[in-house]
Each structure stands twice: as structure tokens, then as C-alpha cells.
Image (cartoon, rainbow, N blue to C red):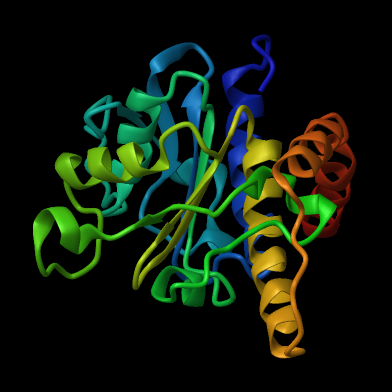
Amino acid sequence: MSSSSSLSEVIADVVVANHILARQGVVDGFGHVSVRHPEDVGKFLLSRSRAPELVEAADIMVFDLDCIAQGGDTRTAYLERYIHGEIYKARPDIHAVVHSHSPSVIPFAASSVRLRPIYHMSGFLSGATRVFDIRHAFGCTDMLVRKREHGAALAAELGDRSVVLMRGHGFVACGLSIPVAVYRAIYTEQNASLQQRAIALGGEVTYLDDDEARQAEATNRGVVGRPWELWKRQVQG
């Protein structure tokens, strides 16, 4: 996200990000995407509780990092807004967060098989992707990150990485900008699907090693604007 981006431009981007993720099958009636406020790093923008494909500019709410709606906005917010607020607190470098329940990823949070980068587009998954298990810290719950303590534990599991899986739930992808976070969410889902296909072949699977993954990620980070432009065109007509 450019430091010169206006509030209206950032709102437009977070709206289109919702639509892109829906079109790409990363979110459906559930899931959400947020961005730091361009004028105040202690706040973030997130839609009111609504299916991502239906999100419009008027739906965007402003929250502080404790996930309290600003300006007296009393509309119904996503229960899991604490995912976003606590990650922004813990990671000043992150400016956009996507939460998804995409189907190819969920098995890797329930299995001892870890999600690993199988091709160059997912170099950001370097190493075995971490899994957040809410039960370890909070016992049996409804699996939702519905309070600050839950969000803080999730952010701690994310650590310095860009993706964390959530057992029995989904995953979170983060980035320096909305296009980067959206890119990572889409290619996390695609990598998970491809990894399952490779495993199903029955032979030994060769993953990217850490150095290959780092180099691929460095290259791809410089061209994220290319798929972002395409994805925007596809949802805007």
C-alpha cells in the first residue's frame, strides 16, 4: 500500500479484494479481508458483517486495534475481527490481512502433513507452515477467534511468517499491501490443492527448499501488480 494512497482509494481496494477472493474461491459467504487505515496505523478498515462478494464501499467500517468500531458505528461487525486487530498490533510490517476457510487448505491444519511450497508461486510458504490450535490455549471452543486473547494467540503462532493455518477452521494470509495479501491467500489455496494431488500420485514429493523458496518469493513480490491488475479487471468487468 502506497503511503500516498487516499482513504477512498484504499476503501476501493479492500472492496475489490473481497470480490477477487470470492471469484477465486478463496472465500464464499464467509471470510474477510482488512487493511490498515492509510492515515492512522492504529486503526484498520474492515467490512461490516457481510458475504465478501456483496461488500460495497458503504459497508467498510473503521476499527481501532482493540477492534472497537469508531465514529459511533453500531452496525454488526464480524465476530472474528480480533484476527485482524491482534495481528496488526503484533506485526507493524503487516498492512493487510485475509481470513479464509478455503477447502484445499483445511486438511493440512488437521493432518500431520504440513503445507509446504510445491512450486515457485508459493515461495512465501517456505518451511512447514505453522498451525494454530485454539484448543491448546483455551480448551474446547466453537473454533472462532472471538476475543482479543484468541487473536493474540493466533498472532503469536503466526510469528514472523505470512501465513498461519487454523485447525478445524481455515487460514490467515498477510502482507505489506492488499495485493500481496490477496496474492498469498490465492496461492496458498492453489498450493494446497497441488500438494494434495502430488501426494495422491503415491511417489516421493519434492518441495522447494528454503533457499529456492526465498528466491522465488523475492522475484514474485516484484510482480504482484500483474495478477492484481488482471483480477481487478475480472471482477470489475
Frontmost residue, 83 versus 17: 83
- Horizontally, is 164 left or right of 3 in the view? left
Q: Is 70 drawn above or below residue 79 in the view shown?
A: above
- Horizontally, is 137 left or right of 166 in the view? left
Looking at this rendering, what residue extends furthest in the front direction? 204
Residue 152's image quarter?
Answer: top left
Q: Position of residue 203 (x, y in %)?
A: 76, 84
Q: Position of residue 221 (x, y in %)?
A: 79, 33
- Horizontally, is 61 left or right of 145 in the view? right
Frontmost residue, 208 versus 44: 208
Residue 16 appearing in the image: no
Residue 83 appearing in the image: yes
Quadrant assignment for the N terminus: top right
Looking at this rendering, what residue extends furthest in the left direction? 139
Residue 45's image quarter?
Answer: top left
Q: Position of residue 175 (x, y in %)?
A: 59, 34
Residue 131's image quarter?
Answer: bottom left
| Residue drawn where x is 54% and y is 71% of the image | 28
| Residue drawn where x is 76% and y is 38% of the image | 211
Frontmost residue, 212 versus 12: 212
| Residue drawn where x is 72% and y is 66% of the image | 190
Frontmost residue, 164 versus 200: 200
Q: Is 235 drawn above or below residue 56 in the view shown?
A: below
Total numbered labels: 0
Quadrant assignment for the C terminus: bottom right
| Residue drawn where x is 41% and y is 28% of the image | 44
Q: Is 199 drawn above or below residue 123 in the view shown?
A: below
Q: Position of residue 198 (x, y in %)?
A: 75, 79
